[in-house]
Amino acid sequence: MDIFVPVKLVPDLVEELEIDNSGTSLDRTFLRLMLNEFDEHAIQEAILLKNRIGGQVIVIAPDYDGVDDVLYTAVARGVDRVIKLNGDFEGDVNSHALARIIAAKLKKFDPDLVLTGVQAHDSLDGPVGALLSAELGIPYVGYVSKVRMSEGKCTVSKEYPGGLMAEMEVVLPAILGIQAAEEPPGYIAISKIRQAMKGATIEELDSDELNCSGGVTPSRMYQPEVGEKATMIDGEEDAIAERIVEVLKERGIF
Amino acid sequence: MGRGMSKASRLQRLEEILLSSSRGHTIKELADVLEVHRTTVWRDINELSLQAPVQESENRYFIDRKEYLSSIRLSRGESLMLYLALRKMIRQQSHLPPMMVMAMEKLSMALRHPSSVQLAESIQGMKNGQLSTVELARIWEVLVQGWIERITVRITYQEIQTSVVEEYEVQPYQFEPTVQGEGVFLIGHCLSHEALRTFRVDRILSAALTTKRFVRPKDIVIDSMLRHLWGIWYGEELTRVRLRFKDPEVAEQVRKTLWLPSQKVRDLEGGGVEWSARVRDVFELVPWIHGWGSDCEVIEPNELQERMIELKKNHGGVTMTVIDVPREVTFSEAFYQSLQEVLDGERIKVCLQCSSCSGICPLGYAMEYHPRKMISALRAEIFDAVLDTDSVWMCVSCYACTEVCPAKIPLTDGLMTRTKEEMLMAGNVPKELQDALENSQRYGNPLGESPRKRADWAKGLKPEVTIMAKADRPVDVLWFVGDYPSYHPRVQKISKAFCKVLAALGVDFGILGPEEASDGDSQRMAGENGLFEMLAIKNGKAFSKYHFNEIITTDPHAYNALKHKYPEFGISYPVRHYTEFLVDRMEDLKPLLKKQIDATVTFHDPCYLGRVNGIYEEPRMLLQAIPGVELVEMSHNRENSLCCGGGGGGMWLDGFQWEKTQTRLSEWRVCEAVEASGAEVDVRRPPIKEKRRRGLQAEEEKLPTKRILAGACPYEAPRFEDAVKMVEKANHLEVKDIAELLAEAMED
């Protein structure tokens, strides 16, 4: 059984985000990228599945800056194969474009199951998983936090808003948008990543032309702005604290 | 404690004390430690000399460790088992080594049973007839010393087959009795053959120690190899088996491996070998031979030959599973071995199980497996059970156990850190710590802050702080700022104060800013050595870009790493803790300290400044240089200082540890600080003796001026300030770093 996990890198919010001169997208000059947290859970869930039922886990990622480290870490976690898609992903690449190029590759691999993060904080045009489903014509279930396999199908637990849980059966092959792995991803020691760097090979595939059509086009991108009714309190910590207490008293909360 | 002690436990304690020091102790010192009168010590020493090799030199008493393994306390049943084993050995020996007879005598005396006494007497008879020569006794002495102290021995040996006498140099790994009952084998690496060889001790004609020490390779665990293989194949009625291995590569493997001490290997033409041995039940060899497949051909005996041919027919020549895999080295064995590779690690062998480590451990009470019990589990080969618990994450790497251990076992560097490493490799890491380690991997600091903002704390300071990459000039002193001083709002204040002190002294200094990464020392002590190495190399690269004369730091953890661990990666610069650096400039510093700070100040010795690096006086000298400061000591101070709880990953295990203990070490310490500086203390936790509390209440009225808990480590200010909020009646206590007090004293 082959479980494919397409992953992507997203801007790390530890660094302050800046808007570029066009005013419609992020300034990527100093952008630090990290693995989308939901994708990390998708990798983890795939490994948990593999440990239960066997098979192999293949992680596939577009070539972003720093993707090699992410792929080696995946190997250290227990992923069997890692594939890098070559191409220009430095600019604004939306989910539609990613879904198209990943689908083109997945068609050739004929996967039994595809797990991917249910969302990413930079996906303005929807999650890659659902779009992949449209491209490949196979079923998709999102917000999944538990997967059980049986002959030719799987049973998944999906969370609905308001804390409702549903259990549903999906015929394979299928795509699952993972919200959380059954066990959170554990710590991977540096020495294990180093071992992976020595032992594993990152396979490389060339990707097709990027096609971003069908997505959304931002007309303006901007930092959060101070609303008219908000008052910012400046000054030393103690003074700020005192002022907050005063305000709370004034409004009758204290 | 002395007077309440029973005589037996006093004698035991005396024995431990005498064992622990090579210099020895005077009667007075012993009387002080044991809290008894000198005449009692005198009597006890005389009594102890009857059981242990107590020696005296220039009125100092000690136990010669060379003469003395350790005090093993055996139950009567255990003594009987040892006695029986010895008895069997003695019966089978044609020449008795004197130490064997002595051991027998001691054991039979210890058993104090009429039958064993009788047996002991019967040995007397044996001794006369069978006792070995002086030379054999000497050979045994040498072999045992070589084995225990890992010294290569030179032996002359008479070959069993040819009777030719040869000289060999051997690294003794193990002694093993022959199962047929003819003697004892020495197993060791023979330098002349460059291979593992066995020698019958009674065929060794002479033995001498060389000056060469050796390290036993960690992949060799003879013990388990022997247990697996010898047990199956040995017996009394022996049949000769001859096997032929034609393939030269396979033959090479056969030549190198020792399956049976009696095996013989003869070279054949064309590179093959013929292997022969005498075994009891030849059919027990079947799976093993079958495992070799077509590489192995049975020549003798016939019944084995036929059986193998039949097997091959039945299985169509397909090789069955190889059963002869030597028993896998157990985790406990491998781990025990790895502990001995740490500096002085082999001392773990002499652990007396005295439990001083577990007793002094500030969090030992909350560990299912405290250090003493961990060693005991290791010896029982059930160390896996230790890893099934999360005990070791209670360890704050404060070195209190290492400091107190009478056998000087490197408990913190070895046992605790290696255990954390194993937990980490297995992914068994509390979430808080995992986050800190992942942050260190990704951002170069455990707080998960942007590395680009590492020097933001220094923005707007006057005079401007030199950032090396921007300044592009050599400086006198490179200040390694560290994680918390760069990012933590409370500790940033200390950084700013230290800037002021440096500026006032006219020190030409610079910082690395965004190029600096975490020193990694606490990550290392939390078991993440690979991460430490990565961070060290990153910092090393940054250092190498600039010119400076020395590195200073306010962080004892960084100091420890830079001083002792970075040089292992070739990153070697003179480094000083800021307290050392400032004491050196005391003449310039003192006139600047004009402002009086009327305060009772008590100093908390940071573990990595004090116990680990022996810096106790410099911080105190700085405090005493401040006019108005009255320095008082807490009950735990200097070598005996109590950890703030932040070391060894403790900084990132706060919630985890709190869940287990419902208190923090920092709170305990703050109680002590309040007590030392004369204020009333919260008596609820941790408990303080009734007597002391009454004393405190009496003093309560004369509350002096300020009370300050001073530190010299970036972990402390935030930890202690939080603790002050938790401990009742501690709100008079201020927490300050020495740098802050110095800066304050410089104000006009």
Image (cartoon, rainbow, N blue to C red):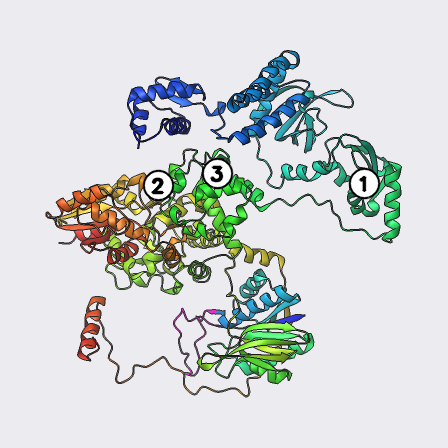
Q: Position of residue A83 (x, y in %)?
A: 62, 69
Q: Mark 2 lies on which chain?
A: B
Q: Which mark is residue B343?
A: 3
- Label 3 Cα neighbours within 10 Å, binned few <14 / some 14-19 / many ≥20: few
- Kind of residue indicated by mark 1: Phe
Disc 2 to disc 1, C-alpha distance: 62 Å
Q: Mark 3 lies on which chain?
A: B
- Label 1 Cα neighbours within 10 Å, binned few <14 / some 14-19 / many ≥20: some
The tag earlier along the polypeptide, 2 or 3, is 3
Q: Are marks 3 and 1 on the same chain?
A: yes
Q: Mark 1 points at which residue?
A: B283
Q: Residue furthest front?
A: B114
Q: Do labels 2 and 1 share a chain?
A: yes
Label 1, secondary structure: give it: helix
The tag earlier along the polypeptide, 3 or 1, is 1
Q: What is the span of residues highlighted in magenta in the rendered image?
A: A11-33
